[in-house]
Image: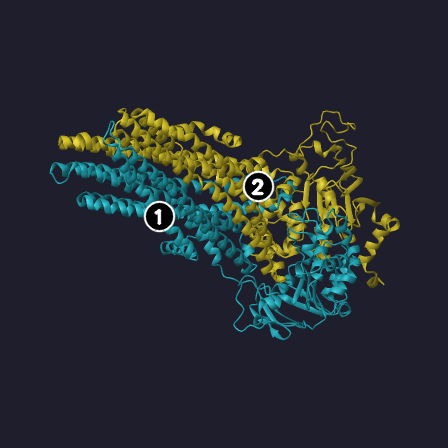
């Protein structure tokens, strides 16, 4: 947090020109997933534009009927045309409402689809992605960025289409009136185009920055709010506020820069339009002096050129919104393009009815290329046996689990389940073979019953209760006002960490699988409760290959094999008694609890 | 929205200047068509080239002034919007951080997060837009109406008669859409909550192959959000067509009325034609006004969510002492010399008001003494710490530090005393040094010492860059035990009066844990220590050990006393000492 630019690796300035085009193309691709809606919307738009254009004709006819003047007004025609006018405008209003409804429907469908894709993507990303990217920033992409795209699709697209129609229509009319006067636009239109292009290029990075900064602000907010208790305990609110101000200032500044640069385009294009009006009137005057045009044509021409400039102004105003949508879309697409967990290799096999033989052969691995954590680990865990992994913290115990579950793949060496290299198995079937209870308990915002049943689809209430009983958490659950239907709030606030661990143990009891991983599963459970759940744990481990990581040496004593891990190497292996007898590292670790 | 205007108030001066400039720019903008008509109707027919250039030049000048005015005013508007939002967001964050724990629980973190970001963002957008569009539209509207009125009052009145209908429908829609936007925002909260939960539990979800299940769950919230967005969108998008309809119907009536007036000789056809030009101004102005209104309803919904937090009653305020305290000792703010350092006096507390999570807990602890707390999972150990840290206030009884009720101590003073390692670890993506320093004014030497005492030096030195090593989010690139040691180092760094370790060495191996205890005993002799632990070995040398069960203290004493008197304690101790090897 001290160096504000830390997350800047995610805002890297990509070469943009082609890139931006591709972003728009990709948004269009989403739109064309709904060809029927798009066609319908286009038809509606043409129709309602046609109706709007007919309106003035009708009013002209009505006025014609009034024209004869005092006492001679043809009322029946006036009423006829006015009635028609009212009908036309009513129809056009109705059409434009239907059109908005269609566009809203279209944009929501697209946006819902995008959110779904992003979420799918999150499920497919390697777990390390979430260690490097702030949750808040990801959330910002799903809320703010997608919202921005949404607004742009439902408003701007319509506006642009109808503007283009008006512009083309007016231009044709003007050419038919006076091709000479149109020459004025030969000067001013390129001016507008050049200016907007220049400006858009200039504001592109500003909008990109705006999206990124908002994401960072969200990331920081999320991080801080998650730690609010610690902040309270240290009374560091003011420090955190100071840092927040840094992020806030940056995001506000980024907004401001994009905002006012964007807000310059409208008035400037308007200025160019006004300029062309001035030129037209002067040039037209000169033409008139040389008898090259009539007064009437000049004034009609001006009428059309004003109608022409309206939509151009509108488009100019929209440009900044489009830029902002494109920047937002870019962030969403970048997330969608992140490399996923490596795909299962071609012809990967599904692991069926696994027995649970687990083996590792000379496995080397490091989270960073230049820092190896495991230096050639080999071990064998025959089906049904219990293997304990002990060692000082940071020696690589959890890393072994990460490799077994294929959260990561080893740099070299192989890990086998039932004799097949796990790289040749489908991830899904491999993970199905495991159940794990981790030190980091995770409960979601559902009822307690749902949380316990999480590991087994369609688990009955009886099974849930039995699991809770075995994990010694049933009494507590029953003491809650809603029992098993108590909803666990946000961070499971009233559950102690030990209780959460018991719930995750109960959860692990339901699914049927052949390999069990216990990573400090009971570290926050008091030892009396631990003793009480021992029979349940024994039952849980029964018939399964169990890999147990624990510091409490009492929990590893009964393992069939103990691996002592130190700085990424297995330095001792054997049963508890064997290891004690040889008086090595394990023995000294074990004895330290009595000193 | 009152709060909203309070935030704008300091900028009223600048807003006025900005609006005045905008006003000027708009006037010049509007002068251009007037000049144009002048040139065509009066100047060109004279055939005087010089005059044509002259007036053409004035038009160019008007255009320049218009663009200058608009750009300057827009820029000022952006500034005002940015600065007021900056302040609003700052205040909201301050308030959010100072919410009590139970208030945070109630608002929920995802909701607070989106109030701080997307809600303030909506407000920002509206503030800018209101200033940019809020001038031109009224000028066009009023100007158009005045010109039309001068032309033909009767026809104008017909049009004006339409306006109330318009006003009412726009107002009605805006009003109706505010709660819809509110619901949309809370649906967004639900989505954020789900995403957040999934990111936090990603390992478990993958391990249990629940990604398809989670997809379905997300699909539910996504659909719900989409529905909310659609409802709000459909309502708001009725505004424009309705307005078009009313105005054009008005125009039709104007023509009919005009026909009668022309027939009666009280008006002329030319006037009707000119009237239609002004009508266009009015129409465009109204379009802008409605756009402001729809953005307004979104802003208003967001603002009410923000205000809800800003106006939350401050809880856990500091009670001013005015010597009415029954035990007057120390009530004047001076620590009483003979008072125990920490005292719990019959403290009772419940999270939900139904079941006591802590009942009638009393103990006292002298300066430099160590308190050990042990007990079953859910016995109330962490609750006891939470109360001492004043995350919550007890429902009954008092907690005293140096004889003073902690409710009477200013937070600055109260929290200065503590060094805390909580169970729920909070490490952030920054250097090890900063994670230990935690924004406090602590010199590098003290931090290095703390790292040493916490038995973290060896692994820290092995990291690239030592204390400059940058942690991943939530310290994901550290092992569980490494994280715990950094948290302990953080607690030790300030050499606190009161050191609280809440089950914070559970991931340490026995050797490290023993070394840690030794270091604390040697170097923090003066600190009063409260240690919550599962392992008897962590607390057995404590001066006082509390055995908690179901929120009550069932036994208190030293290790030796409790081994004698308390079955539960003995049971725990024996289960951990694994008698076998001692034989």
- Location of the C terminus of chain B (image quadrant): bottom right
Category of crowding for the residue at label 1, using alpha-carbon neighbours closer than 10 angstroms: few (below 14), some (14–19), many (at least 20): some
Q: Furthest-left residue in view?
A: A290
Q: Please, is residue B442 above or below residue B452 in the view? A: above
Q: What label sits on residue B508 in the rendered view? A: none
Quadrant for residue A561, please give it: bottom right
Question: In whole angstroms, how far apart are the C-alphas of marks 1 and 2?
Answer: 57 Å
- Of mark 1 and mark 2, the one earlier in the sequence is 1
Q: Please, is residue B306 above or below residue B157 in the view? A: below
Residue behind mark 2: A240
Q: The chain drawn yellow is chain what? A: B
Same chain for labels 1 and 2? Say yes or no: yes
Tell me if I can see residue B293 in this picture: yes
Chain name for mark 1:
A
The residue drawn where x is 61% and y is 40% is A236
Local secondary structure at mark 1: helix
| A130 sits to left or right of B370 | left
| A269 sits to left or right of A563 | left
Chain name for mark 2:
A
Q: Please, is residue B499 above or below residue B57 in the view? A: below
Q: Please, is residue A327 above or below residue A396 in the view? A: above
Measured as percent of width and height from the top left, residue A375 is found at: 60, 67
Residue behind mark 1: A47
Q: The chain drawn cyan is chain what? A: A
Tell me if I can see residue B430 in this picture: no
Measured as percent of width and height from the top left, residue B293 is found at: 45, 36
Instruction: Judge by depth and name the residue closer to the eye, A487 or A192.
Output: A487
């Amino acid at each position: 947090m001290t160096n504000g630019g830390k997350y800047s690796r995610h805002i890297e300035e990509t070469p943009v020109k082609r890139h931006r085009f591709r972003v728009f193309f990709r948004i269009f691709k989403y739109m064309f997933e709904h060809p029927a809606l798009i066609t319908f919307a286009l038809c509606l738009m043409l129709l309602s534009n046609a109706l709007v254009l007919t309106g003035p004709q009708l009013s002209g006819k009505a006025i014609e009927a009034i024209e004869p003047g005092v006492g001679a007004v043809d009322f029946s025609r006036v009423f006829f045309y006015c009635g028609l006018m009212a009908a036309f405008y009513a129809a056009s209003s109705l059409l434009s409402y239907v059109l908005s409804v269609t566009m809203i429907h279209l944009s929501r469908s697209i946006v819902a689809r995008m959110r779904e894709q992003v979420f799918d993507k999150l499920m497919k990303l390697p777990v390390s992605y979430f260690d490097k990217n702030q949750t808040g920033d990801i959330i910002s992409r799903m809320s703010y960025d997608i919202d921005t795209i949404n607004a742009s699709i439902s408003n701007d697209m319509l506006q642009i289409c109808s503007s283009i129609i008006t512009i083309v229509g007016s231009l044709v009319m003007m050419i038919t009136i006076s091709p000479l006067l149109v020459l004025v636009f030969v000067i001013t239109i390129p001016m507008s185009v050049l200016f907007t292009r220049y400006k858009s290029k200039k504001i592109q990075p500003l909008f990109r920055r705006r999206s990124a900064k908002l994401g960072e602000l969200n990331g920081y907010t999320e991080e801080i709010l998650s730690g609010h208790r610690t902040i309270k305990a240290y009374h560091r609110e003011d420090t955190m506020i100071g840092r927040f101000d840094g992020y806030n200032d940056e995001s506000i500044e980024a907004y401001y820069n994009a905002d006012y640069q964007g807000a310059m385009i409208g008035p400037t294009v308007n200025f160019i339009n006004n300029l062309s009006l001035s030129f037209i009137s002067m040039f037209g005057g000169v033409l008139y002096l040389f008898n090259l045009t009539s007064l009437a044509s000049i004034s009609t021409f001006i009428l059309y050129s004003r109608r022409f400039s309206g939509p151009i102004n509108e488009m100019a105003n929209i440009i900044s919104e489009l830029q902002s949508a494109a920047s937002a879309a870019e962030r969403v697409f970048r997330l969608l393009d992140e490399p996923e967990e490596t795909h299962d290799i071609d012809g990967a096999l599904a692991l069926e009815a696994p027995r649970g033989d687990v083996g590792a052969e000379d496995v080397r691995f490091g989270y960073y290329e230049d820092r190896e954590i495991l230096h050639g680990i080999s071990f064998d865990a025959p089906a049904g046996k219990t293997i304990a992994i002990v060692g000082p913290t940071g020696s690589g115990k959890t890393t072994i689990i990460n490799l077994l579950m294929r959260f990561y793949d080893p740099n070299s060496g192989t890990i086998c389940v039932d004799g097949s290299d796990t790289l040749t198995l489908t991830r899904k079937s491999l993970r199905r073979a495991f159940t794990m209870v981790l030190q980091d308990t995770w409960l979601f915002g559902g009822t307690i019953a749902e949380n316990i049943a999480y590991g087994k689809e369609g688990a009955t209430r009886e099974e849930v209760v039995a699991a809770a009983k075995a994990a010694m958490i049933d009494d507590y659950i029953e003491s809650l006002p809603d029992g098993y239907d108590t909803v666990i709030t946000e961070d499971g606030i009233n559950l102690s960490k030990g209780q959460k661990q018991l719930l995750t143990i109960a959860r692990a009891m339901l699914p049927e699988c052949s390999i069990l991983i216990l990573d400090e599963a009971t570290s926050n459970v008091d030892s009396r409760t631990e003793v009480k759940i021992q029979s349940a744990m024994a039952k849980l481990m029964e018939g399964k290959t169990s890999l147990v990581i624990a510091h409490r040496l009492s929990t590893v004593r009964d393992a069939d094999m103990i691996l002592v891990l130190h700085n990424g190497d297995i330095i001792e292996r054997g049963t508890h008694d064997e290891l004690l007898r040889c008086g090595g590292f394990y023995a000294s670790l074990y004895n330290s609890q009595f000193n | 929205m009152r709060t909203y205007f309070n935030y704008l108030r300091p900028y009223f001066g600048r807003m006025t200047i900005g609006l005045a400039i905008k006003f000027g720019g708009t006037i010049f903008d509007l002068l251009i068509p007037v000049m144009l008509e002048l040139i065509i109707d009066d100047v060109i027919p004279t055939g005087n080239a010089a005059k044509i250039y002259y007036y053409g030049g004035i038009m160019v000048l008007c255009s320049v002034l218009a663009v200058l005015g608009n750009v300057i005013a827009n820029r000022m508007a952006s500034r005002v919007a940015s600065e007021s939002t900056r302040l609003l967001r700052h205040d909201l964050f301050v308030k959010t951080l100072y919410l009590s724990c139970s208030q945070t629980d109630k608002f929920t973190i995802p909701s607070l997060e989106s109030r701080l970001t997307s809600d303030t963002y909506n407000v920002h957008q509206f503030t800018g837009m209101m200033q940019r569009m809020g001038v031109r539209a009224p000028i066009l509207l009023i100007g158009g109406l005045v010109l039309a009125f001068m032309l033909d009052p009767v026809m104008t009145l017909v049009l004006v008669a339409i306006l109330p209908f318009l006003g009412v429908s726009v107002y009605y829609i805006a009003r109706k859409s505010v709660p819809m936007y509110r619901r949309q925002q809370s649906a967004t909260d639900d989505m954020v909550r789900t995403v957040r939960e999934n990111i936090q539990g990603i390992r478990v979800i993958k391990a249990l192959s629940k990604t398809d299940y989670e997809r379905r769950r997300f699909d539910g919230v996504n659909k719900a959000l989409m529905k909310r967005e659609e409802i709000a969108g459909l309502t708001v998008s009725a505004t424009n067509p309705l307005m078009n309809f009313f105005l054009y119907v008005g125009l039709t009536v104007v023509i009919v009325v005009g026909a009668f007036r022309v027939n009666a000789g009280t008006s002329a056809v030319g006037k009707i034609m000119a009237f239609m030009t002004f009508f266009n101004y009015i129409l465009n102005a109204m379009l802008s006004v409605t756009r402001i209104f729809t953005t307004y309803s979104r802003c208003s919904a967001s603002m009410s969510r923000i205000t809800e937090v800003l106006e939350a009653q401050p809880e856990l305020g500091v009670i001013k002492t005015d010597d009415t305290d029954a035990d007057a000792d120390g009530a004047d703010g001076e620590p009483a010399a003979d008072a125990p350092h920490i005292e719990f006096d019959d403290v009772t507390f419940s999270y939900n008001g139904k079941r006591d999570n802590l009942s009638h807990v009393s103990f006292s602890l002298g300066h430099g003494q160590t308190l050990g707390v042990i007990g079953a999972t859910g016995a109330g150990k962490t609750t006891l710490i939470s109360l001492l840290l004043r995350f919550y206030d007890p429902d009954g009884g008092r907690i005293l530090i140096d004889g003073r009720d902690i409710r009477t101590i200013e937070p600055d003073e109260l929290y200065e005393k503590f060094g805390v390692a909580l169970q729920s670890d909070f490490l952030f993506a920054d250097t090890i040094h900063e994670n230990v320093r935690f924004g406090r004014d602590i010199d590098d030497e003290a931090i290095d010492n703390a790292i040493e005492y916490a038995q973290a030096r060896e692994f820290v030195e092995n990291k690239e860059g030592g204390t400059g090593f940058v942690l991943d989010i939530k310290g994901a690139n550290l092992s569980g035990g490494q994280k715990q040691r950094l948290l302990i180092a953080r607690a030790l760094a300030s050499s606190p009066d009161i050191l609280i370790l809440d089950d914070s060495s559970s991931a340490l191996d026995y050797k490290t844990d023993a070394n840690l205890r030794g270091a604390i005993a040697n170097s923090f002799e003066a600190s009063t220590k409260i240690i919550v632990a599962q392992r008897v070995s962590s607390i057995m040398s404590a001066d006082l050990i509390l055995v908690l069960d179901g929120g009550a203290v069932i036994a208190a004493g030293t290790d030796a006393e409790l081994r004698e008197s308390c079955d539960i304690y003995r049971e725990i101790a024996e289960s951990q000492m694994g008698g076998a090897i001692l034989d």
